[in-house]
Image (spheres, grey):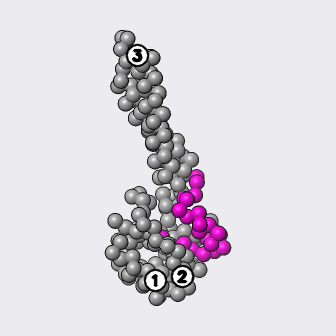
Amino acid sequence: MRRRIYWLLPDLASARRTMDDLLLARISEPHIHFVAREGEVLTGLHPANLLQTSDVVRSAQAGLVIGGAAGAVLGVIVALFFPLFGDSPEWGMVAVLAIVGAGFGAWSSSLIGISTPNHRLKRFESAIEQGQILLMVDVPRSRVDDIESRLQTLHPEAHLEGVEPNIPAFP
């Protein structure tokens, strides 16, 4: 299980030094993510991807649940009132329409979520717009204190912004 540590860095030079220090601390590059304002060039850094900066995962999960429930309700109605073969209810339609509804709900919700900023990053928006760079580093639970103290010692210009107890499986 990993924890995500958030840091705000004042500029690009500080972000590059922090990236180097994290690599020296044996944190692999796929677990280091930087977010900067629109148009900022993050050469030499590992920028956060769309899964980390948008609400696509959370939206897809909500769409899956809502679409599945709506599909199941529609399936019950179709099974009871519109049987395809004979006069008895076709309960298989409930499962089929629940699966179709869940898939459609996840797909359509993810289209909305991909254009919505990540709710976890909302508190950093003003700092990022002012030119600061957000560092998100995913570390094993056993190394959180070690990495925090290392970065506080080596980068007094950076600000620790907290630790997320559980990071999502995908981003």
- Left-right relation of 1 to 60: left
Range drawn in magenta: 115-136
In the structure shown, which secondary structural element does the residue marked by tag 3 occupy?
loop
Determine which residue is flagged by label 2.
Answer: 158
Q: Position of residue 133 (x, y in %)?
A: 57, 74
Q: Position of residue 166 (x, y in %)?
A: 41, 63
Q: Position of residue 76 (x, y in %)?
A: 42, 25
Q: Which numbered circle lies on residue 83?
A: 3
Which residue is located at x 40 percent, y 15 percent? 84
Q: Give the amino acid type for the residue marked by disc 1 in the picture.
A: Leu
Q: Earlier in the sequence, mark 3 or mark 1?
A: 3
Q: Earlier in the sequence, mark 1 or mark 2?
A: 1
Q: Position of residue 36 (x, y in %)?
A: 58, 70
Proximity of marks 3 and 1: CB atoms separated by less than 8 Å: no
Which residue is located at x 61 percent, y 70 percent? 128
Q: How many numbered badges does the structure rendering display? A: 3
Proximity of marks 1 and 2: CB atoms separated by less than 8 Å: yes
Can residue 165 be seen from the camera position used here?
yes
Q: Give the amino acid type for the residue marked by disc 3 in the picture.
A: Pro
Determine which residue is flagged by label 1.
Answer: 151
Which residue is located at x 39 percent, y 28 percent? 94
Whole-Å distance between the Cαs marked 1 and 2?
A: 8 Å
Q: Give the amino acid type for the residue marked by disc 2 in the picture.
A: Ala
In the structure shown, which secondary structural element does the residue marked by tag 2 occupy?
loop
In this rendering, the answer to whether 86 lies above or below 10 is: above
Residue 124 within the segment the image draws in magenta: yes
